[in-house]
Image (tube, rainbow, N blue to C red):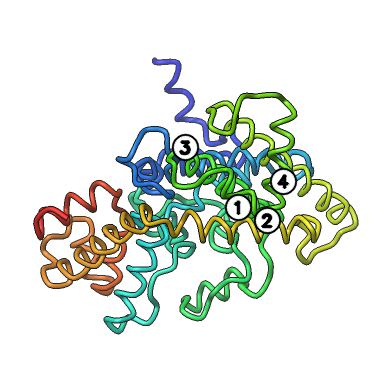
Amino acid sequence: MNPSDRFYKIEKDFRNPFARDRDRIIHSGSFRKLEYKTQVFLNHEGDFFRTRLTHSIEVSQIARSITSQLGLNESLAEAIALAHDLGHTPFGHVGGDTLDESLKSDGFSNGFEHNFQSFRVVTTLEKRYKTFDGLNLTFATLEGILKHSFPYKKSFLPKSIHKNFNLDKHPSFEAMIVDRADEIAYVSHDIDDGVNSGVISFEDLKESELVCEILSKVSAEGIGTENDEMFRYRFSSHLINHLVYSLLDYSLPKIQEGVVETPIGMDRVLEKQLKELKKLLRQKMYQHQKIVRKMYAGKQAIKGLYCGLMEEEKMLPSFYYKQLDIRSKHRVIADYIASMSDRYALNFYNEMYGKL
C-alpha cells in the first residue's frame, strides 16, 4: 500500500476549515485564470505589471499580516482575499461595467456585479463534486466574499441571499480587513506599475500629501533618484507599512473595546489623504490616454462577444451550453465572458470579427 493512500481514508482533515477553503480556492480553475486578467495594464504589455493573480496574492499577504496582529483568524482572511476577485471580467473594471451595461440594455435588470459574481463562482460555476456545484466553502468565507465591500448594493440579489447572509449587517472583521488590504495593495502597486510604465511620475504625484510624506522617508535612505527601480521598491514598501501600521493603531483599540460598527479603519487625516491620492490616480493615471485606449479596445471586445454569443449561442463551450437548460441565456453568456482571460477574450473576438 502506498503510504500516501492512508490520508484518503481518514475522515478528519489536518487543516482547519478556513485553510481547507483557501486550498480549494487556490486549486480552482478560476483562480489560475487570474494570471491573465488585467489589473491596470493588459497582461501582454509586459511581465513586470501586476495581474489579478499577483494582486490577489498581495492582498492576501497584507490581510494575513493585519489579522495576525489583531488576533483574528488569518486563514479566514487569506481565503477571502484569494477569492475576492474571482468574479472579475477581462479588462479590469471596464470589462465588468461593459458587461453590466450590455445586460441591462438587453432588459436583464440584474446586470453584473463582480462581488456577487465571485460568490457565484465558488458556489455555482466551479464544479469539483459529483453531487453538487461549487467548492463547498464555509459560511464565513462565503459571507466574506459576498460582503467584504460594505454597504452592499443588494436590490438585484435573490431573496435566498438576503435571508441567509443578512446583507444589512457588516461582515466579519476579517472581511473588513480584506477590503482595506485590497485598497492598500492596489494603491501601492498601481503607483509602482504606473511609474515603471512612464504613464505617471512621482513628480505628478507630489500633489498628494501622503506621497510627499512617503517620498521623504525614501529620500532619507539615500537611494538614488526617483527614476531608479530600487527607489520604487522602497516607496511601495514604505507606503504599505505606513498604511498598515496606521490601520493597526486605529483598529486594535476598537476591537479590544468591542466596537462592532466599522472598527477597521484609519485616522481621519490619513483617510482624507488616501481618498485624495486615489482621486489623483484616477485623474492622472487611470484616465491617461494610453490606459484609456487599451481599455476601450477591451470594452469593444466585451460588447462584441456578448452580441455574438447572444446571436449564436452554439459557440458556447459544452459546459455553458448545457447551462442554457437551467439558467437564462443572458446569465450564462455573462458567466462565460466573465470567466475569460484577457488574451482569450481578444482571440475569440478576433476569430468572430477580425483583428481588433
Which residue does the image show at 35% across and 55% down from the upper left? 91
**Sequence-wise first label, 2 or 4:** 4
Mark 2 or mark 1, whichever is nearer to me: 2
Mark 3 or mark 4, whichever is nearer to me: 3
Q: Secondary structure at mark 1?
A: helix
Q: Label 2, on which residue?
A: 274
Q: Label 1, on which residue?
A: 183
Q: Label 4, on which residue?
A: 243
User: Badge 2 local density, few (<14 within 10 Å), some, or many (20+)?
Assistant: many
Mark 2 or mark 4, whichever is nearer to me: 2
Marks 2 and 3, how far apart at CA: 21 Å
User: Badge 3 local density, few (<14 within 10 Å), some, or many (20+)?
Assistant: some
The image shows residue 195 at horizontal and vertical percentages of: 50, 41
**Sequence-wise first label, 1 or 4:** 1
Q: Amino acid at mark 2?
A: Leu
Could you tell me if residue 14 is visible in this image? Answer: no
**Sequence-wise first label, 2 or 3:** 3
31 or 280: which is nearer to us? 280
- Tell me the number on the disc at residue 196: 3
Q: Secondary structure at mark 3?
A: helix
In the rendered image, the residue lying farthest to the bottom is 107
User: Badge 4 local density, few (<14 within 10 Å), some, or many (20+)?
Assistant: many
